[in-house]
Amino acid sequence: MQTSADAHQTTPSAYTPLTPHLDEDQHNLRVLIDQVATTRGLILQMATRLMAYHAAPDERSRDVIRDEFLSIARQFERHVTLVFGKGHFAGQPQSHVDMIRTAAAQDPQRNIQMQTVLLEVQRIAKGIAAGTPLRFDQARRFLEQNWPVVRDQMTQVISDVWANIDAARKAEIETAKQAANALGTRLSRLEHIGKHVRLVSLNASVEAARAGDVGKGLLVIAHEFKSLAEEIQTLAKDARCDMALIS
């Protein structure tokens, strides 16, 4: 959970903006989170339309404002469903949706408060569609009561999403470090074996030379051992180079 001091941060410390062709999955996740962030602005837009409705100069203008409000209300409902709903969400990778919903579920009160706002929006949308919009003072009260809720809850969801991403990335890095350390230990053992095999091949070559014709068979084996030792050492060297590149 983020503190109030950094509640408005929406970018993680580990995030480096990348163009889509470099890392499409990361880019798409960033776009989705930014889309979720716009939920805060939707409540402002709806309140503005409600108050502007009464200032419209004619029926045609009121119709335009009404249609805009209904469109924004549907978008707001879609965003709330994305963040607090269950099951598949059309048009988005389920892994990204699950990541956002996991962060949202860290505080059960978020869902309750946002669903309360959504019910209010749906009620108002039903009224304005039927030709009974809120009065100006009711529209202002709608803004005063619901804007702080949506602003604070959605900001916290976004902050927690990035915090979870940072934590997961750090855990992956730590796991990779542990694996690299274990691999380094095994490579050291492999290099030791290679040196030992090379020493054995050298001793076998010496003994074969002493044995003359009788030792020709042993000399062939000694050469094979030497080739094997060189291959082991080459593989170990290449593996260490690969590890260095990964690091």
Image (spheres, grey):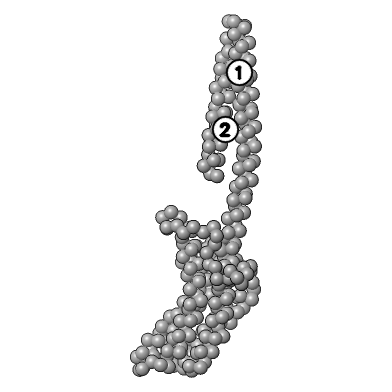
In the rendered structure, the answer to whether residue 241 lies left or right of residue 131 reads right
Q: Quadrant of residue 168?
A: bottom right
Can residue 104 be seen from the camera position used here?
A: no
Neighbourhood count class around disc 1 (C-alpha, 10 Å): few under 14, some 14–19, many 20 upward? many
Q: Looking at the image, how many numbered discs can be counted on the residues?
A: 2
Which one is nearer the viewer's eye here, 70 or 175?
A: 175
Neighbourhood count class around disc 2 (C-alpha, 10 Å): few under 14, some 14–19, many 20 upward? many
Q: Which mark is residue 236?
A: 2
Image position of 196 with respect to 11: above or below: above
Residue at horizontal 46 percent and vertical 65 percent from the top = 31
Can residue 131 be seen from the camera position used here?
A: yes
Among all residues in the image, which is located at the extreme top?
213
Secondary element type, mark 1: helix
Amino acid type assigned to the residue bearing label 1 in the image: Ser
Q: Quadrant of residue 166?
A: bottom right
Q: Which residue is mark 1?
A: 201
Image position of 95 with respect to 173: above or below: below
Residue at horizontal 50 percent and vertical 90 percent from the top = 139
- Which callout, 2 or 1, points at the residue further toward the start of the chain? 1
Among all residues in the image, which is located at the extreme front?
5
Secondary element type, mark 2: helix
x and y percentages locating residue 128 in the rendered image: 46, 90
| Contact flag, marks 2 and 1 (Cβ < 8 Å) | no
In the rendered structure, the answer to whether residue 193 lies left or right of residue 51 reads right
Image position of 191 with respect to 44: above or below: above
Residue at horizontal 59 percent and vertical 66 percent from the top = 160
Which one is nearer the viewer's eye here, 213 or 148?
A: 148
Quadrant location of the N terminus?
bottom right
Q: Quadrant of residue 191?
A: top right
